Amino acid sequence: MAYQIPRGTQDLLPEKSYQWQALERTLREFCYLYNYDEIRTPVFEHTNVFKRENDSSDMVNKEMYTFQLENSKTSLTIRPEGTAGVVRSFVENKMYANPDLPVKLYYMGPMARHERPQKGRLRIFNQFGIECLGNKSPFTDVETIVLAFSILKALGLNDLKVCLNTLGDDASRAAYRQALQTYFEPYVDTLCSDCKRRYAQNPLRILDCKVDHDKECMKNVPKMKDYLNDESREYFETVCHLLDELEIPYAVDDQLVRGLDYYTHTVFEIVSMNQEMGAQSTVLAGGRYDHLIPYFGGPEQMSGIGWALGMERLLIALEAEGITLEEKPGLDAYLMCLDESARMYAFKILTQLRAYGYRCDMDMLQRSFKAQFKAVDRSHAKFALIIGEDERKNHLITIKNIEKKTQESISQDQLIEYLDHYFVDEDHH
């Protein structure tokens, strides 16, 4: 029987892993600069962490992997996104009592959604995200956007656009929700089945529909900005002003509502304008949420803001702009063993080199001299260390510089000093 990977998943093979590690390092370095600390939450949670009352999002209604334990009423869900689990942990561990709010956290790891697989969209995917919890300020909103934009620019992405909108506070949203229900009432029967459900649950989500977005009724939809109260309007104007001051390019998109129901006030996406990205052009997205912390039992009126990016999709965006983060590095040295009697001597040298921090390997299969030299080439080693019976008897090593095509014999005691001298000189160049 042939075993195959499940549909919508992928193996991360070794030749790709160095790009992932380089991406992860960059993300961690920026979080360090912005004073964000890592949090790691379980890969599954109680279902009610994600499935909240009257949630209209596709993620909750269609895409979650939910299971029940045998002989138990406990319902668990593999996490489809990171925010809910982080906020649950924030409340459960009483991090809201921290005297220096906000608490700034980042996470990285696999998520699962049962949706149609396509380019940049997998059923098991890796997500990186940040959450800034415990305060509410336009300055915090802008700081999170600047962090996101700075990371993407540092990775080398240029074809970027920040799309921005506000969903206002509760009063503004209630007024806008009523306006949308009144507007869409004559068109409900023409909408897709999902939007018929959204009409009652959360009509803002109709604006995000991929099925109905080209219909005539979508052209004259009321705009959120016309239903903002003074407080919400002033909040959003401050966000825009701060972005202008920092010269962060953005465009206000009246129909940007985001895919999850818990957002309030500022919402944003950063999209790639590169045509290679196709329909999946959103690289990063997020927004503010006013009710998630109280939902989990935290203090009333305590707010948060965050964003997340799909790491697979970000790597596609980098590839579309011809950016390779890092390839597998070559070895510092490869040890070639000429006969069996010298194998233990070679193995001890290999272990010594690794103890001094050198990346090296040796032939373990007793292959021919020619086959071992091919392994040196494939490993892109800087040096080949040739060890036979004569070297073992006389405590010598024949060392070949692959790039310069030079070869000499040195004593075993000189090896570390010899390599240290070479690599120090190379670093200076």
Image: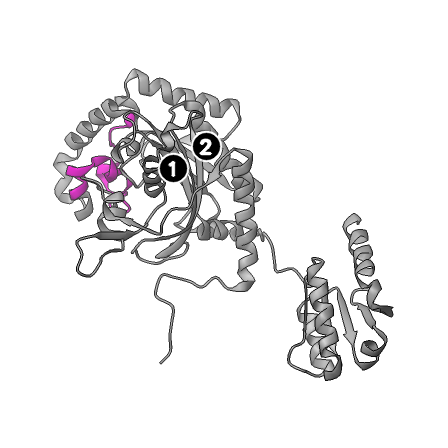
Ranked by sequence position, the earlier of labels 2 and 1 is 2
Q: Which residues are magenta?
A: 197-224
Residue at image position (86%, 68%) is: 410
- Residue 276 in percent (x, y) is at 47, 52
What is the tally of numbered marks visible in this picture? 2
Q: Which residue in the protein does label 1 denote?
A: 286
Question: How far is the residue under mark 2 from the one under mark 1?
Answer: 9 Å
Instruction: Give the side of residue 397 with respect to residue 214, left or right.
Output: right
Q: Is residue 392 above or below residue 171?
A: below
- Residue 343 in percent (x, y) is at 72, 78
The answer to whether the residues at label 2 and label 1 have Cβ atoms under 8 Å apart is yes
Under circle 2, the secondary element is: helix
Quarter of the image that includes the N terminus: bottom left
One can see residue 401 in this view: yes
Q: Is residue 76 above or below residue 359?
A: above
Residue 206 within the segment the image draws in magenta? yes
* Snapshot quadrant of residue 158: top right
Image disc number at residue 111: none
Residue at image position (17%, 31%) is: 183
Q: Which residue in the protein does label 2 denote?
A: 144
- Residue 28 in percent (x, y) is at 53, 43
Q: Nearer the viewer, residue 27 or 276?
A: 27
**How dense is the environment of label 1, judged by Cα within 10 Å: few (below 14), some, or many (20 and up)?**
many
